[in-house]
Structures are given as structure tokens and as C-alpha cells.
Image (tube, helix red, strand yellow):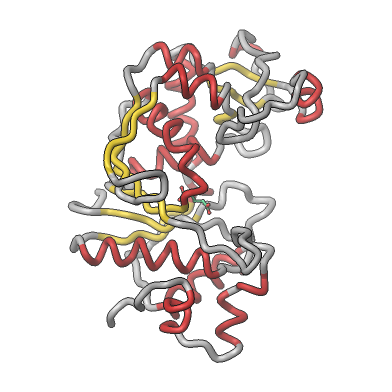
Amino acid sequence: MPPEGYVTRFAPSPTGPLHLGHAFSALTAFARARAAGGTFLLRIEDIDRGRCRPAWEAALKDDLRWLGLSWPEPVLRQSGRLPAYRAALDRLAAMGLLYPCRCTRGDIRAALSAPQEGAEGPDGPPYPGTCRGRPMAEAGATDALRLDIAQAAALTGPLTYLETGGEDGPPGPRCEAPAALAARAGDVVLARRDLGTSYHLAVVVDDAAQGVTEVVRGADLIGATMLHVLLQKLLQLRTPSYHHHRLIRDAAGRRLAKRDDARALARYRAEGARPADIAAMVGLRPPAA
Ligand code: GLU
């Protein structure tokens, strides 16, 4: 049974060391759960088995515990959730909203005639629609599954969620017309051929299964949130509120990435930093014991 009351989660992928940006996200989520008297969950987003390593998972848990965070065990690992993702895909397929796609990245690039200035969807330029209309009966092991987003949009009313962060304007409701999302996002992949699912599908299914009431994550994901709201509507799942937080940047103003080992928590730890130093570096107070 999911926990009651406020529930949030920190959902890293174990593909590299945690850096200051992750620390900020996890500390923010933990503090918001504490303030609400709610629950902070850790979720391991390891659907991409080729890139994830058990050693990174052990290291990230160690870093988070060292920072002063705690969470209920056992943690949910997405690699064990493929049947749940499959069930969601079956449901969308039964609604006639999925089609198999065999395009390679090169095919898609070639089909996009002009550079799509300003038309970046959550996964890049919208898919040109080459395979749209292919029947699901043709789906083979080498096909991805895409959402026919115009059809999906036609089934739903306005898309809304409550923003509790302040990165894209004052906190409050956010709204987008389904047709506007469809034009911006295009037919996104919901099941990659190599993974059988995708980030968008897995995150929506799991947030609902875990009873998450507020998603705390970086402002880089604002552009994907209405797509998540659309999927929630199609799958009849509750929409949580979203707290998109600022991104931690390096001295040159670039957001940190996993490859930025220089900003890895492990490195600061090895140099003798304490948890309070990390919190101060990202502009927070450390969690009270
Ligand atoms: N695994 C995702 C990441 O590391 C989580 C994004 C989210 O919180 O929805 O960026």
C-alpha cells in the first residue's frame, strides 16, 4: 500500500556519481517531505540496464545516507517493473493510441526537412510521423512503440497541474491545450526497442503506484511535465503537484551532468567536506538530525 499524506521521491539513475545537482534535488525533496510530515522515497531508475551499474547504485545510496537522508526500504527499482509498464502499454494500445516505429535516428534526421528552430519537444524535435498508422499487429522486436499524440490529445480536455516551484513563474496552476502539447512534443516513444519502456511511461506509472503527491525535480524537466499529465489522464492516474527547482550550474553557467566528476559528492567527501558544507554549496541548510 502506498504511504498516506504527502509523498515525494528522489529518482536517480545509477549511471554515474551523484553530483551537487543531485544533492540539491534530494535535499530539497527531503526537506519538503519533512516540512509536510510526509514521506521521502528513493526510487532507482535503472530501466537502461546497459548504462546502469550496481556499484553506482551502492555509491549513490551511500552518498545520500552520508548527506543525512533516510527512506523506507525496500526501494522501488524500475528494472523490476516491466510487467507494470507492459500493462500500461497494453491499455494504450487497446485505445488505439500506439503504433510500432522502425525508424532509426538517421531516418528521422533525414525526414526532418529543415532544422526545427524553437520546436524542441521533451525528446528533441517532434517525430515526423513516418510510421504513423502502422498497425500494432506488425510490431516486432526491432520496433519502438510511439504514442499517436494527436489522437491522444483528442481524447482529453485541458491539461493542468499545480506548480509549487517558482522557476517558470509564480507558483500556481499551469495549463496547456492538448493540441499545443501534441504540436510541441510530437509522437513520443513510450517503449524503446531495447528497453520495452521509456522514461516518460515509467515515471508516470511509478509515481502513481507509489502514491507520490508531489514530484520534486529539476526545472530541465518542465517541458516534459504536460506529457506526463497527458499520460496520467489516458491511464486514469492522479496528477501530483510538481515542484520544479532551479538547476545547479558550474562556474561557466552550464548545468552539471554525471560526467562532471569534478562536482561529484564522492570527490568532496574525499577532500574532507562535511554534509553541511555540501548543503551550503547549493544554498541550503543541512537536514536537522
Ligand atoms: N531519473 C530521472 C533523472 O535522473 C528522474 C527524473 C524525475 O525525477 O522525474 O533525471
Q: Quadrant of the C terminus?
A: bottom left
Tell me residue 74's x, y (percent): 38, 62
Residue occupying the point 62% across, 25% down: 126
Tell me residue 52's x, y (percent): 63, 57
Tell me residue 273's x, y (percent): 52, 87
Residue occupying the point 56% across, 52% down: 46
Image-quadrant location for residue 286: bottom left
- Given residues 82 and 267, the one toward you in this image is 267
- Given residues 144 and 130, the one toward you in this image is 130
Q: Above or below — where is 37 with respect to 222?
A: below
Would residue 285 be found to the left or right of residue 247 on screen? left
- Given residues 12 and 268, the one toward you in this image is 268
Q: Is residue 161 visible?
A: yes
Q: Above or below — where is 74 with respect to 262?
A: above
Would residue 68 be found to the left or right of residue 1 on screen? right
Residue occupying the point 56% across, 69% down: 19
Image-quadrant location for residue 146: top right
Q: Is residue 83 visible?
A: no
Would residue 92 be found to the left or right of residue 263 on screen? left
Image-quadrant location for residue 194: top right
> Residue farthest to the bottom?
272
Tell me residue 89's x, y (percent): 48, 26
Q: Above or below — where is 104 with respect to 71?
A: above
Residue occupying the point 33% across, 65% down: 30
State how many labels appear. Answer: 0
